[in-house]
């Protein structure tokens, strides 16, 4: 398996500084305000949410492909940053819509639950509550 790379640079104090995260061809600026308030830019939690959405969608696609479905999967993640002796990701809410000809809701729910538990990013967050709202389009 390949090893992936991402990086970040932070300059200045926590509240007045700024940073840039880079992964692949994407560069995202971030600040205290973009992370802990509602400021412009991105933050590590959004990056994790994007990673989790992509990982879940690909894992579910793999499971559906094994059953000869050709799905379209749209997934989003809400990553909640709370406090537990310091900042901590306390909850991730995955919401996913799937369309695939012939797929029943029962089979989708069964495979969706497996994907939620076994995608690599979900496993990374083993100590975090992860919820899933999964619907058939």
Image (tube, rainbow, N blue to C red):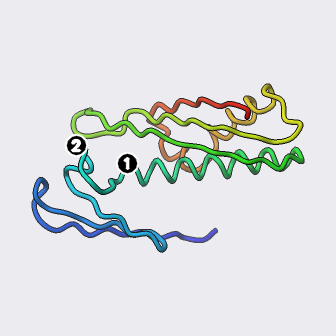
The circle drawn on residue 28 is none
Q: Is residue 52 left or right of residue 81?
A: right
Q: Residue at x 13, y 55 (%)?
A: 14
Quadrant of the rendering where the N terminus is positioned: bottom right
Q: Earlier in the sequence, mark 1 or mark 2?
A: 2
Rendering quarter of residue 74: top right
Residue nearer the viewer, 60 or 29: 29
In the picture as drawn, the residue positioned furthest to the bottom comes out as 25
| Residue 110 percent across, percent down from the top left | 75, 30
| Residue 83 percent coordinates (x, y) | 25, 33
Which residue has dot 2 on it? 37
Image point (27%, 59%), residue name: 30
Give the foreground label among 1 and 2: 2
Marks 1/2: CA–CA distance: 13 Å
Left or right of 11? Residue 132 is right
Q: Answer few, some or many: residues within 10 Å of disc 1's Cα (few below 14, many 20 plus, some between 14 and 19).
A: some
Label 2 secondary element: loop
Q: Are marks 1 and 2 in contact (CB under 8 Å)?
A: no
Residue 81: x %, y % from top left: 32, 38
Quadrant of the image occupied by residue 9: bottom left
Write the residue at 47% across / 74% down.
Answer: 25
- Secondary structure of the residue carrying tag 1 is helix
> Mark 1 — residue?
45
Crowdedness of circle 2 by 10 Å Cα count: few (<14), some, many (20+)?
Answer: few
Tell whether 47 sits left or right of 18. right
Against 1, is 87 above or below? above
The quadrant of the image that shows the C terminus is: top right
Q: Position of residue 47 (x, y in %)?
A: 42, 54
């Amino acid at each position: 398996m390949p090893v992936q790379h991402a990086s970040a640079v932070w300059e200045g104090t926590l509240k007045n500084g700024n940073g840039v995260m880079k992964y692949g061809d994407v560069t995202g600026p971030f600040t205290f305000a973009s992370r802990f308030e509602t400021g412009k830019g991105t933050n590590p939690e959004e990056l994790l949410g994007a990673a989790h959405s992509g990982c879940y969608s690909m894992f579910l696609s793999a499971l559906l492909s094994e059953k000869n479905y050709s799905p379209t999967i749209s997934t989003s993640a809400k990553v909640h940053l709370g406090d537990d002796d310091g900042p901590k990701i306390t909850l991730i809410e995955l919401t996913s819509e799937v369309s695939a000809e012939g797929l029943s809701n029962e089979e989708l729910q069964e495979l969706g639950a497996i994907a939620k538990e076994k995608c690599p990013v979900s496993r990374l967050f083993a100590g975090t509550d992860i919820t899933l709202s999964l619907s058939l389009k």
